[in-house]
Amino acid sequence: MSTTNHPVTPTATETWLLMASLVHDHSAAWRAFVTERTGMPFSRFRALRRLEPAPLTASALAERLDVDMPATSVIVTDLVARGLVSKTSDPDDGRRKILTLTPAGRDVMADVRAHAQAPTLIQALDEQQRATLHQILSTMQEHDA
């Protein structure tokens, strides 16, 4: 009697663990590159990245960065002082601040993209595989907002 080997579909948890391990294992080099290229702590780059798609309130940025409001305030104050982020009052609620990437902030993001090298595990993918992975990650990001 012969049994056919059917691939087992990985669980969401198994997929998450694999993705988290791959990203974590290669994050040190990425962080070092970004810090050296931008001349600022990686936390500042993370904030710029979160503000890149659209302006956010300070509390929404704190939530997306998974840091408390005092830490977010330090990050935002630094980014505003560097001219990378603008901070304006929310027209609907003056107590809330709206954070927006400035043209200089967009230039920093463009510069990092222009000079970054993807880890070999991404470079090993062919064009179609990269497109598929990018599409999957973009879909995941949309559900994270």
Image (cartoon, rainbow, N blue to C red):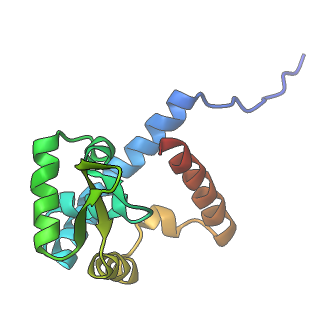
Give the quadrant of the N terminus: top right
Q: Residue at x 69, y 29 (%)?
A: 8
Q: In terms of depth relative to the viewer, which is nearer, 17 or 2?
A: 17
Q: Residue at x 47, y 61 (%)?
A: 121
In the rendered image of this protein, does residue 46 appear above or below residue 110? above
In the rendered image of this protein, does residue 143 appear above or below residue 80? above
Numbered disc total? 0
Q: Is residue 143 left or right of residue 60?
A: right
Q: Residue furthest top?
A: 1
In the rendered image of this protein, does residue 111 appear above or below residue 47? below
Q: Residue furthest right?
A: 1
Q: In terms of depth relative to the viewer, which is nearer, 115 or 9?
A: 115
Q: Determine which quarter of the picture holds residue 135.
A: bottom right
- Image coordinates for residue 124, horizontal then vertical, percent: 54, 67
Q: Determine which quarter of the picture holds residue 62.
A: top left
Q: Residue at x 21, y 78 (%)?
A: 37
- Image coordinates for residue 88, horizontal then vertical, percent: 25, 63
- Image coordinates for residue 65, horizontal then vertical, percent: 28, 47
Q: In terms of depth relative to the viewer, which is nearer, 65 or 1?
A: 65
Q: Residue at x 78, y 29 (%)?
A: 5
- Image coordinates for residue 140, horizontal then vertical, percent: 55, 46
